[in-house]
Image: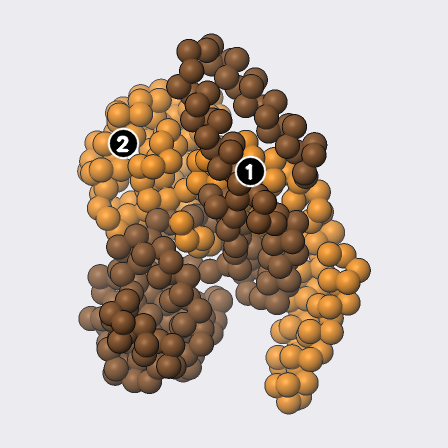
Chain colours: A orange, B brown
Amino acid sequence: MYPLFVNMKNKKVVIAGGGKIAYRRLLALLKEEADITVISPTAIDEIVQLANERKIIWHQRPIEHTDYKDAFLIIAATNDPEVNKQIAQDASPHQLVNVASDHESGNVHIPSFFSRGKLTIAVTTEGASPSLAKAIKEKLEEIFDESYEDYVSFLYEQRKKLKEMDLPEKEKKKKLSELLHQFIEKEL
Amino acid sequence: MYPLFVNMKNKKVVIAGGGKIAYRRLLALLKEEADITVISPTAIDEIVQLANERKIIWHQRPIEHTDYKDAFLIIAATNDPEVNKQIAQDASPHQLVNVASDHESGNVHIPSFFSRGKLTIAVTTEGASPSLAKAIKEKLEEIFDESYEDYVSFLYEQRKKLKEMDLPEKEKKKKLSELLHQFIEKEL
């Protein structure tokens, strides 16, 4: 599996299912400003509320192929593994499909992950042990605590400033490398 | 940016450019058994050799729109930032596009990452500081050393065995959680 960090802004995401897994996926994708449609005969209160607030669209019925034929990302998270599998089979090979109930179906895994500003660390075990992925993620959240957010933006700003400066390329690289190494020796 | 681990097997990948960055991306994608075409008037020896060995296709000319209109993933890594930007603009919104020279163009970032069997950890700073991402990745490679490969497959096998056992669901979860916690207390 190849890791990609994808800009989901305004991308059409179709989620089949209205349970806790659907909701967890939905929350993270809402943060990324994706265009989300949930399709499910039933949904937990949290999903209903988001639909009422018009933050997402909820169609209260079983999913059909036409619902996801133009989706960028499909999340098959119904409580029926057969339905989820069928969705993965019916999707076009160019679509991104995540099947919550079966890591072998679909072509996309969604890892455990966390962010500190522009820094994001993602952990997956490709379904071998989701609890291990989660435990490792939690450990990394401790190591890379919230102070990293400031540090990453500091490095980002310094890098931008250096790029604009009238210095030889080699000198710029050297300065940036010094900044980084000071940090690494102290923090990592 | 939303992290996805994507199954690249047999997926059409078009790489514009034949330099070191193109080669680095290419190597990782080849491992994932992607179907890779490099399009570039010139290419470094390593790329030429892979083309000679028929592991990839290399078209020795500048890229045109028709080259990537059916690609699943496009990597714009020519040495001309304007060409790279143009590729990102011409791609359809459903295509995955990575622009090596400009992290704001395109819709996909490729993180620093490493694997230990089924465990993969990916780090990105969304272009804020690629060197920091790399340094963090290297630090994590030390923490999660090669012994993790065995451990992850052990957990995977135990999970499979437990799933097949005639035990109440609750009991299975408890046993799996115990295994995991023994490890976490010892190793993490």
Q: Please provide percent x and percent y for residue A160.
A: 63, 74
Q: Please provide percent x and percent y for residue B129.
A: 61, 66
- Pointer 2 indicates a residue of which chain? A
Q: Secondary structure at mark 1?
A: helix
Quarter of the figure with the C terminus of chain B: top right
Q: Quadrant of residue A61?
A: top left
Q: From the viewer's perspective, tell me whether residue A184 is left or right of residue A8.
A: right
Q: From the viewer's perspective, tell me whether residue B45 is left or right of residue A70.
A: right
- The residue identified by callout 2 is A85
Rendered position, B157 above or below A157: above
Q: From the viewer's perspective, tell me whether residue A55 is left or right of residue B95.
A: right
Q: Please provide percent x and percent y for residue A47.
A: 44, 27
Q: From the viewer's perspective, tell me whether residue A29 is left or right of residue A70.
A: right
Residue at coordinates 26% horizontally, 76% vertically from top-left? B52
Any part of residue B44 in sight: yes
Q: Quadrant of residue A158?
A: bottom right
Residue at coordinates 44% horizontally, 23% vertically from top-left? B161
Question: Is there one chain holding both mark 1 and mark 2?
Answer: no
Residue at coordinates 77% horizontally, 67% vertically from top-left? A182
- Give the mark toward the camera: 1 or 2: 1
Q: Amino acid at mark 1?
A: Tyr
Residue at coordinates 22% horizontally, 61% vertically from top-left? B70
Q: Amino acid at mark 2?
A: Lys
The extreme right residue here reads A186
Q: Residues within 10 Å of mark 2 (few under 14, many from 20)?
A: many
- Of the pair B45 and A49, the residue shown nearer to us: B45
Instruction: Using the numbered discs, state the Cα–Cα distance from disc 1 to disc 2 in whole angstroms.
Output: 29 Å
- Pointer 1 indicates a residue of which chain? B
- The residue identified by callout 1 is B151
**Residue B84: which disc?**
none
